[in-house]
Amino acid sequence: MNTRKIIIISVTILIAALFLPVIIFSWVFSELPVSHQVQDWSNFGSYIGGVYSALFGFFSTAIVCLTLLFTIKYNKEQIEQIKKQHFSSLINIYAENLNSKLDKKTYSYFHPESGCHVNNNESTFLVYILKKYNNNYDIEILNHKSNNPEDKRQYHPNVLRIGINTISELEIKYSSEIGNLIQILNLIDSSENLSTRKELLSQFQAVTHRDRMFWMMLYAYANIPSARESIAFNEGLLIAAEGVKRSTGCIND
């Protein structure tokens, strides 16, 4: 119930309470003539005074309670806003550190074609792993058709499974960078407010690059239990890199 409705209901109750004693008194004694006895008017005054004194006490208490209610609500909103701003600042700091590490990262990974590990910059690595993933995706489809020749339905391999298998095949690691990502995911998960969590998630996506984050997210999903829970819980956290063949397991724009 919003504040406006509470105020309207409170004013309505107040007006009704002010007039109700007089209405009840008039209805009960409406058939009697107007008294000229001092005692009768004294009794009437005592009745009115007692009723309105009780009402005054009731509404004084009610006003204090409503004031406390609005104060608590306002303070809670302020605390939530301060917390959101704090989390937002921390995400910017962690994301900046993460981007800085990834910008400088030399990717060491296994090269199946040559049978040895190679070292490359990010752009070369991203091109290679995308090609490797899509190749594994196509192989999965061909294997399914070979193993199920009578199945005429279109088969869509799972993005998570193919992606994690590709990461494992290349033996890629994010040992020095994964800490920053876990801190960001923990911040997003720690927010109890759904809208705040979505805002923090959108902010994280805005200050990072999906082509590099997709593979790091898959690595985190495969190796860090808390990250796996976070990715599964927060819809849209895993966004496919551009050019990735997909059908299930992630969201793309």
Image: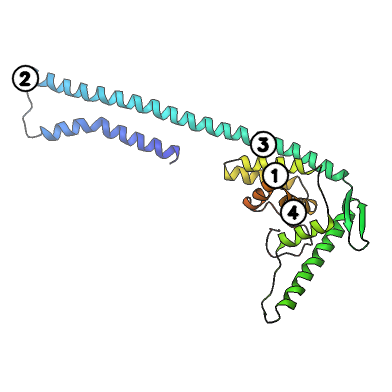
Mark 1 or mark 2: name the one nearer the start of the chain: 2
Dot 4, how many residues are within 10 Å of its Cα: few (below 14), some (14-19), or many (20+)? Answer: many
Q: Amino acid at mark 1?
A: Gln
Could you tell me which residue is drawn at 83 percent across and 63 percent down?
132
Q: Amino acid at mark 3?
A: Phe
What's the CA distance linking mark 4 and mark 1?
A: 20 Å
Q: Amino acid at mark 2?
A: Gln
Q: Position of residue 118 (x, y in %)?
A: 92, 54
What's the CA distance linking mark 2 and mark 3?
A: 74 Å
The residue beneath circle 4 is: 218
State the SS at label 4: helix
Can you tell which quarter of the image residue 66 is in? top left
State the SS at label 2: loop
Mark 3 or mark 4: name the one nearer the start of the chain: 3
Q: Are marks 4 and 2 in contact (CB under 8 Å)?
A: no
Can you tell which quarter of the image residue 32 is in? top left
Mark 4 or mark 1: name the one nearer the start of the chain: 1
The residue beneath circle 3 is: 87
What's the CA distance linking mark 3 and mark 1?
A: 11 Å
108 over 36 or under it: above or below: below
| Disc 3 versus disc 1: nearer the observer | 3
Q: Amino acid at mark 4?
A: Leu
What's the CA distance linking mark 3 and mark 4?
A: 24 Å
Q: Position of residue 223 (x, y in %)?
A: 73, 50
Q: Position of residue 115 (x, y in %)?
A: 92, 60
Res 203 label: 1
Dot 3, how many residues are within 10 Å of its Cα: few (below 14), some (14-19), or many (20+)? Answer: many
Res 253 label: none
State the SS at label 3: helix
The residue beneath circle 2 is: 37
